[in-house]
């Protein structure tokens, strides 16, 4: 513990066991963090104890703390109110800070005969018609997308009638989501009718829209306009399907906010679903550095609802926290009547929370270039193997040889559940003679982590420490490699991938014995893919070295023929057999050949023909 931290801890230990707010300053005196505590001494002293228990974000903050001050309050609730006020005033660097960028949204109806519908965040003086404003950009975006799909209106950048017949219809036409006016075969009257119906849908909702469309369909049928009646019928069915879909999402949902979080690798994503009138009308995602503390949800709620004037009657969360009652009291005061905060365990509410958390995971996964399915299998693998963190970066190794000759190894890397081919590496075994897979694997891992030490932990290539190592092999390979890791003081989870007698993945093995994965379909498929990929990569390298050596043992044994000239000869004649059949004149005319070298090649293949 350095002198500064020791001094701060000593000061923290002298604080009272009373509620209050603490304010951290850097060397320049700038406020970098504000927090509240039920007992100031207990909370503040935690920052200046062992740094091993802190998340990276907290360690960075503590490293920058030069001093702190505190304000005692009469209650934890007063401390919460004061904390909110001070954070809003000073916007400290290490607090969760959310921007209030939720402006109003509009439905834009372009000018001209061939109108298009879109959603925008600002009105412009461009001659278009604007409907709104609306509070929720998510609601407007979703509604416009629904209307364009149901009434088959174009969403492309083509202009009509200028772009008639200038290109083929896009995919939306083929999947029946656009009537394709670009073909020039859509009547203006029919197009304008669809636009009017879409606007009616947007203004009046699905129920009013169905009523209006039904009247139009009946009128068309009475006038014997059966094709028009059929088109309107299809639109009614599309509106009903959309309405049913909304019912599934919003069935028995209270007017409430549903909030869930997903954390991984130093990042946290909070997802918010906002329900109003029994329908999901808004959703928001927030990603920031995680501090891995129990108070993260509490702090998020404080920041989020500080920006909101419309406080819901109910809030459903995915986990509880110590200050939940205090937050509920604060929100109730802000709303003017009671606000309930719950953590549902079963039923429809629990399903909504689960869906919200899945969306948070998906948002964070997309940020990292993965999908929620890939993250799910990594979470399951983490649980099965008892890992401390998600195996985001996996290295896998395999040895390949032929009766102890041409010993090579391949290393493949999976990042966020996907192959990272730029990180694949090949190894030629140097210190092992004959067929000894255990010693070969130990050599490869030893060389790999020698490079890690040389790279000074740059977090790129060999400078990055993997979250998990998977060896193509059983207990023997695991034991040989484990010894290397211990010698080099490398702490990385290590397991082997065991195959059955048909060379298919059967289980994962570690120091504690085999772990069956046959019943875990997603993990079984994932591990099998890794094992197949590393085997393919290692054996491919082995074959290439054998081919190269065969190549060297023929042409490159001829005087005057090196690898470059040999490759040129092969490129010119296609095969070694064609080279052996070529006469001296053909060889002399070949690229990069001299008369002396051509004669040497000819003599090599026609020694008995020369006197």
Image (tube, grey):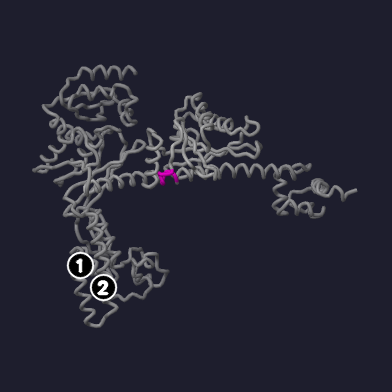
Mark 2 touching mark 1, by CB under 8 A?
no
Seen at 40% across and 41% down, the residue is 378
Q: Nearer the viewer, residue 582 or 158?
A: 582
- Residue 174 in sight from this viewpoint: yes
Which residue lies most toward the bottom here?
224
Q: Is residue 20 left or right of residue 527?
A: left
Quarter of the figure with residue 128? bottom left
Element assignment for label 1? helix
Query: Where 117 sits versus 1, above or below?
Result: below
Residue 417 percent across, percent down from the top left: 43, 44
How far apart are labels 2 and 1 at the CA level? 11 Å
Magenta stretch bounds? 518-524
> What residue sits right under mark 2 in the picture?
232
Q: Is residue 454 magenta?
A: no
> What residue sits right under mark 1 in the picture?
209
Which residue lies most toward the front here?
501
Query: Where 69 sits versus 92, above or below?
Result: above
Q: Nearer the viewer, residue 209 or 538?
A: 538
Residue 392 percent across, percent down from the top left: 41, 39
Residue 385 percent across, percent down from the top left: 41, 35
- Residue 464 in sight from this viewpoint: no
Which residue lies most toward the left here?
336
Q: Is residue 519 magenta?
A: yes
Q: Nearer the viewer, residue 475 or 205?
A: 475
Counting residues from the start of the chain, the first of labels 2 and 1 encountered is 1
């Amino acid at each position: 513990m350095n002198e500064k931290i020791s001094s701060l801890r000593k000061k923290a230990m002298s604080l009272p066991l009373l509620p209050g707010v603490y304010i951290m300053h850097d060397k320049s005196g700038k406020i970098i963090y504000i927090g509240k505590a039920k007992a100031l001494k207990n909370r503040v002293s935690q920052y200046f104890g062992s740094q091993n228990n802190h998340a990276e974000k907290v360690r960075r903050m503590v490293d920058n703390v030069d001093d702190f001050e505190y304000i005692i309050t009469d209650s934890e609730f007063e401390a919460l109110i004061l904390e909110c006020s001070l954070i809003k005033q000073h916007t400290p660097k290490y607090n969760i800070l959310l921007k209030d960028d939720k402006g109003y949204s509009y439905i834009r109806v372009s000018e001209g005969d061939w109108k298009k519908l879109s959603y925008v965040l600002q009105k412009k003086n461009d001659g278009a018609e604007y409907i709104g404003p609306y509070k929720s950009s998510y609601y407007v975006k979703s509604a416009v997308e629904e209307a364009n799909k149901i009434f088959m209106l174009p969403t492309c950048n083509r202009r009509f009638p200028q772009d008639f017949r200038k290109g083929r219809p896009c995919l939306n036409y083929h999947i029946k989501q656009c009537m394709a006016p670009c073909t020039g075969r859509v009547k203006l009257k029919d197009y304008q009718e669809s636009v009017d119906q879409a606007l009616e849908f947007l203004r009046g909702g699905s129920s009013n829209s169905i009523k209006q469309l039904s009247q139009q369909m009946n009128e068309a049928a009475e006038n014997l306009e059966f094709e028009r009646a059929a088109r309107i019928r299809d639109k009614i069915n599309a509106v009903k399907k959309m309405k049913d879909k909304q019912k599934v999402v919003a069935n028995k949902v209270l007017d409430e906010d549903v909030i869930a979080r997903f954390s991984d690798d130093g990042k946290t994503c909070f997802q918010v679903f906002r329900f109003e009138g029994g329908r999901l009308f808004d959703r928001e995602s927030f990603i920031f550095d995680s501090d891995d503390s129990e108070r993260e949800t509490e702090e998020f709620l404080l920041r989020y609802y500080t920006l909101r004037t419309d406080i819901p009657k109910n809030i459903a969360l995915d986990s509880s926290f110590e200050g939940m009652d205090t937050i509920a009291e604060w929100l109730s005061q802000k709303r003017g009547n009671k606000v309930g905060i719950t953590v549902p365990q079963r039923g429809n509410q629990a399903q909504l929370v689960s869906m919200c958390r899945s969306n948070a995971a998906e948002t964070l996964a997309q940020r990292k270039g993965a999908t929620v399915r890939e993250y799910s299998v990594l979470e399951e693998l983490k649980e099965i193997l008892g890992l401390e963190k998600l195996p985001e970066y996996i290295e896998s190794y395999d040895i390949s040889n032929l009766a102890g000759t041409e010993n090579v190894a391949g290393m493949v890397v999976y990042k966020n559940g996907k192959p990272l081919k730029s990180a694949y590496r090949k190894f030629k075994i140097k210190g092992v003679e004959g067929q000894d897979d255990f010693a070969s694997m130990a050599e490869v891992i030893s060389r790999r982590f020698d490079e890690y030490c040389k790279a000074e932990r740059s977090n790129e290539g060999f400078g990055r420490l993997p979250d998990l190592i998977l060896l193509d092999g059983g207990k023997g390979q695991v034991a040989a490699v484990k010894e290397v890791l211990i010698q080099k003081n490398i702490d990385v989870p290590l397991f082997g991938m065991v195959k059955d007698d048909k060379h298919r993945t059967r289980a994962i093995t570690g120091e504690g014995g085999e772990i069956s994965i046959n019943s875990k379909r997603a993990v079984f498929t994932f591990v099998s893919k890794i094992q197949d990929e590393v085997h393919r990569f290692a054996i491919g390298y082995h074959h290439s070295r054998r081919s190269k050596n065969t190549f060297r043992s023929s042409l490159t044994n001829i005087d005057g023929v090196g690898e470059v000239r040999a490759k040129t000869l092969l490129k010119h004649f296609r095969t070694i057999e064609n080279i052996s059949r070529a006469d001296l004149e053909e060889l002399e005319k070949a690229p990069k050949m001299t008369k002396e070298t051509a004669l040497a090649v000819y003599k090599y293949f026609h020694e008995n023909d020369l006197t």
